Image: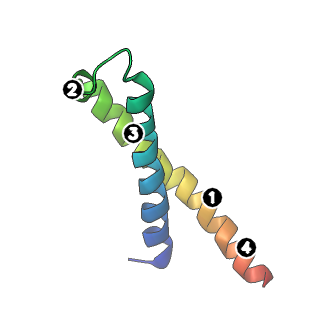
Amino acid sequence: MSERWKYQIKTGGIWGLFMTVFNVLFDIKEIPFSEQVATPNFYIRAAAYITVGIFVLGYFTWKAKVKQQAAK
């Protein structure tokens, strides 16, 4: 696997997990944790955050990293 994909998976995956946890904690007063995790909507949103994190956020942060390294 190329360095780019390793970087994108690491950064995007961490961002996706963070956003999933943040959304659970944001709604915890209204909907208990066990009810949030029991719905398919939770898993769809988590997969969407992770996917967007890897492919979009990971791509743009990789490009910025390469551009910064080239400037040195």
| Residue 36, x across and y down, in percent | 28, 24
Q: Image check: 44 left or right of 19? A: left
For the residues labelled 3 and 4, say whether their Cβ atoms are less than 8 Å apart.
no
Residue at the disc numbered 4:
67
Q: What residue type is disc 4 on?
A: Lys
Mark 2 lies on residue: 34
The answer to which quarter of the image holds residue 21 is top left
Q: How far separated are the C-alphas under marks 2 and 4?
A: 44 Å
Pointer 1 residue: 60
Quadrant of image for the C terminus:
bottom right
Badge 1 vs badge 2, beta-carbon distance below 8 Å: no
Q: Nearer the viewer, mark 3 or mark 4?
A: 3
Number of on-image labels: 4
Which element type, helix, strand or loop, lies under badge 2? helix
Check disc 1 and report its element: helix, strand or loop: helix
Callout 4: SS? helix
Residue 21 is tagged as 3
Mark 3–mark 2 distance (CA, rounded to whole Å)? 13 Å
Amino acid type, label 2: Ser
Marks 2 and 4 close (CB-CB < 8 Å) = no
Q: Residue furthest bottom?
A: 72
Q: Report the residue at 24% width, 29% height from top.
A: 37
